[in-house]
Structures are given as C-alpha cells and as structure tokens.
Amino acid sequence: MNDPNLLANLMARKTQLLELLRKLGAAQLSLVDEGDMSRLLQVLGSKDSLLAQLQLVERELDPFRDEDPNRRQWASPELRASCRRDADRCAVLLTEIMAIEKQSEVEMSRRRDATAAQLQGMYGTQEAQGAYVTTPSASSSASFDLSMEG
C-alpha cells in the first residue's frame, strides 16, 4: 500500500502545475491574438518545462492508480478531502486547458491562412507588375532606317 500523504502531496503539486499551465495557455492565446510571435515562443518554452514536470508527477502517481481509494489509511479526513478537492480541481483545469489550446490552435490557423492570403496577394501583384515591365528585345532595339534610297 502506498503512502496517502505522498498521494496528497502529488495531487497538490499536479494542481499547481495545471494552474500554471492554464495561466500560460491564456497568455499564449493573448499573444496569438496580438501576433507577438517572439513572446509566444517564450511562453511555449515555459509550457514545455511545466509539461515535463507534470509528466514526472504523473509517473509518481502511477502506483496509486490501481489502488482502492477506500482502503487507504489517511492521516486525517481533512487530508483525504483536500486530496479529493485537488483531484476534482485537476479535472476542471484539464478541461479548461484543452479548451484554451483548441482556441489557440484555431486562432493560429486563422492567422496562418490570413498570412498565406496576404502573401498570395503580394505574389499576384508582382506578377501583374511583371506583365507591364518589358525588357528590350533584339527587334525593339534595332534602329529603322527611315531614309529613302535614291
């Protein structure tokens, strides 16, 4: 049987990490809306670090997953209730994080498509301009002799 105190500590840590991920997700969405790619990359780097920490916590939680929660020997009913609140909060946070990520993905796709359309428009403008620019050819640079013979 695993230590319920460790479980409570891990769930509290998981909750903290998910809270931070949600905050960074909201910042990410805001930066996508603003088009601030430099700061967006910084936020994504921070999220990467938090996700790595979250993976470690999840691995530490693995031994508890197959246990019967009713057989755990809690130090107090308060600790058990606190762990349950953290587990419930984690479920809510995960749902919120997924919604923010989806919204960010949609906004990034919209920006990508708008940029592609802009670039396509610029390319079309260049082609149109190119059609009006003529380069001197051999026939147009030849001089005509307009003098009359004889």
Image (cartoon, grey):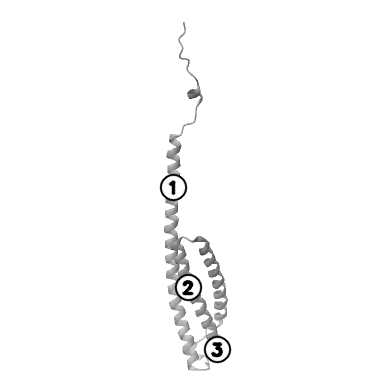
CA–CA distance in space, label 3 to label 1: 60 Å
At which x and y percent is residue 48? 55, 69
Q: Which residue is mark 1?
A: 120
CA–CA distance in space, label 1 to label 2: 36 Å
Q: Residue at x 45, y 67 (%)?
A: 101
Dot 1 or dot 2: first in sequence order is: 2
Q: Residue at x 47, y 82 (%)?
A: 87
In this view, which residue lies farthest toward the front? 147
Dot 2 or dot 3: first in sequence order is: 3
Secondary structure under badge 3?
Answer: helix
Amino acid type of disc 1?
Gln
Q: Which residue is mark 3?
A: 5
Q: Residue at x 47, y 64 (%)?
A: 31
Amino acid type of disc 3?
Asn
Secondary structure under badge 1?
Answer: helix
User: Above or below — where is 97 with respect to 87?
Assistant: above
User: Above or below — where is 37 with respect to 25?
Assistant: above
Residue 4's label in the rendered image is: none
Label 3 vs label 1, nearer the camera: 1
Query: Mark 1 and mark 3 in contact (Cβ < 8 Å)?
Result: no
Q: Which residue is mark 2?
A: 23
Q: Residue at x 44, y 51 (%)?
A: 116
Label 2 vs label 3, nearer the camera: 2
In this view, which residue lies farthest toward the bottom? 76
Dot 3 or dot 1: first in sequence order is: 3
In this view, which residue lies farthest toward the top? 150
Query: Mark 3 and mark 2 in contact (Cβ < 8 Å)?
Result: no
At which x and y percent is residue 144? 47, 17
Q: Please rate how many residues cluster around mark 3, counting C-alpha atoms within 10 Å: few if below 14, some from 14 to 19, many from 20.
A: some
Q: Please rate how many residues cluster around mark 1, counting C-alpha atoms within 10 Å: few if below 14, some from 14 to 19, many from 20.
A: few
The image quarter containing residue 110 is bottom left
